[in-house]
Image: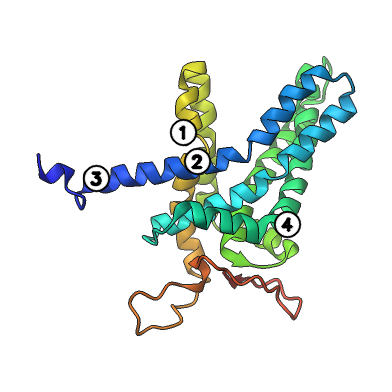
């Protein structure tokens, strides 16, 4: 029994990893607080356009949180543990503008598709092929979205280059893409089955938990584009892509080829 609670035992390492994922999830949830606060305030407003604008603006910081979440989780699964909170907020700071721009674009697409799907579901006569087209479009955008922020967290690139590479990854690693989509749907399935009783569990692991599983799927794909550690003679040398102080320089030649952070 004593070995079970040894700090180097598999049980304790697993427990520590669960705690790390919990911390990352709670840090990510912090960026949803403005959205929920504005959502509460909008209950006292009657202008739908104003409500929509306020909710959209309040949701913008979430993109940086997604980027930082993947940055930290990838370090965890590769055994590069460090100061989780410091790494998280440093990634938020370094990627905030680019992540916010990409997230705003995805958010607009998701809102438009959500409205269209709502209308298609409630309309009496809505063409079935168009319904199918909307669902397919939602799946494609979701797949690209699931690759975009891991790429942004790990490689220095332009917005266009990041999106282009996300599309390439979506198609080129299609089985992994399906796995990432399936993992991302787990919280919705758990919520559907458990209803409000599972909300504490979702608050603790509902975002970072599936993302942690996705890291295992996209990490091998990323390794194909990573250089060796800069100092091969140093066993403790960390790849530039995982350092806490990523290089922020954009490619000077206009190329979409990503550089490692």
Q: Position of residue 21 (x, y in %)?
A: 43, 44
* Residue beneath disc 4: 97
134 to the left or right of 224: right
Above or below, comparing residue 77 to residue 109 in the picture: below
Task: Estimate the spatial distance between the alpha carbons at disc 4 and disc 3, rounded to whole Å.
Answer: 38 Å
Mark 1 or mark 2: which comes first in sequence?
2
Task: Estimate the spatial distance between the alpha carbons at disc 1 and disc 2, rounded to whole Å.
Answer: 6 Å
Locate the C terminus by quadrant.
bottom right
Task: Estimate the spatial distance between the alpha carbons at disc 4 and disc 1, rounded to whole Å.
Answer: 27 Å
**Number of dots carrying numbers:** 4
Mark 4 or mark 3: which comes first in sequence?
3
Mark 4 or mark 2: which comes first in sequence?
2
Q: Which residue corresponds to the image point at 46% horizontal and 36% vertical from the top-left?
A: 205
* Residue beneath disc 1: 204
The secondary structure type at the circle numbered 2 is helix
* Residue beneath disc 2: 25
Q: Which residue corresponds to the image point at 47% horizontal and 59% vertical from the top-left?
A: 219
């Amino acid at each position: 029994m004593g070995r079970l609670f040894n700090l180097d035992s598999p049980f304790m390492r697993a427990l520590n990893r669960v705690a790390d994922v919990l911390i990352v999830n709670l840090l990510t949830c912090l960026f949803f607080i403005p959205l929920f606060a504005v959502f509460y305030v909008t209950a006292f407003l009657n202008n739908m356009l104003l409500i929509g604008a306020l909710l959209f603006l309040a949701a913008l910081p979430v993109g940086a949180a997604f980027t930082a979440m993947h940055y930290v989780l990838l370090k965890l699964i590769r055994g590069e543990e460090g100061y989780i909170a410091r790494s998280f907020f440093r990634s938020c700071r370094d990627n905030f503008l680019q992540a916010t721009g990409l997230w705003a674009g995805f958010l607009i697409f998701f809102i438009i598709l959500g409205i269209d799907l709502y209308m298609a579901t409630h309309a009496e006569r809505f063409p079935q092929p168009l319904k199918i087209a909307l669902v397919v479009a939602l799946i494609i955008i979701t797949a690209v979205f699931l690759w975009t922020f891991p790429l942004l967290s790990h490689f220095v690139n332009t917005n266009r280059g990041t999106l282009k590479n996300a599309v390439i990854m979506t198609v080129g690693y299609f089985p992994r893409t399906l796995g990432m989509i399936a993992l991302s749907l787990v919280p919705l399935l758990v919520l559907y089955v458990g209803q409000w009783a599972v909300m504490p569990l979702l608050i603790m692991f509902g975002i970072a938990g599936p993302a942690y599983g996705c890291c295992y799927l996209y990490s091998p794909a990323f390794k194909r584009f990573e250089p060796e550690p800069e100092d091969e003679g140093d066993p403790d040398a960390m790849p530039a892509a995982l350092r806490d102080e990523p290089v922020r320089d954009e490619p000077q030649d206009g190329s979409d080829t990503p550089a490692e952070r």
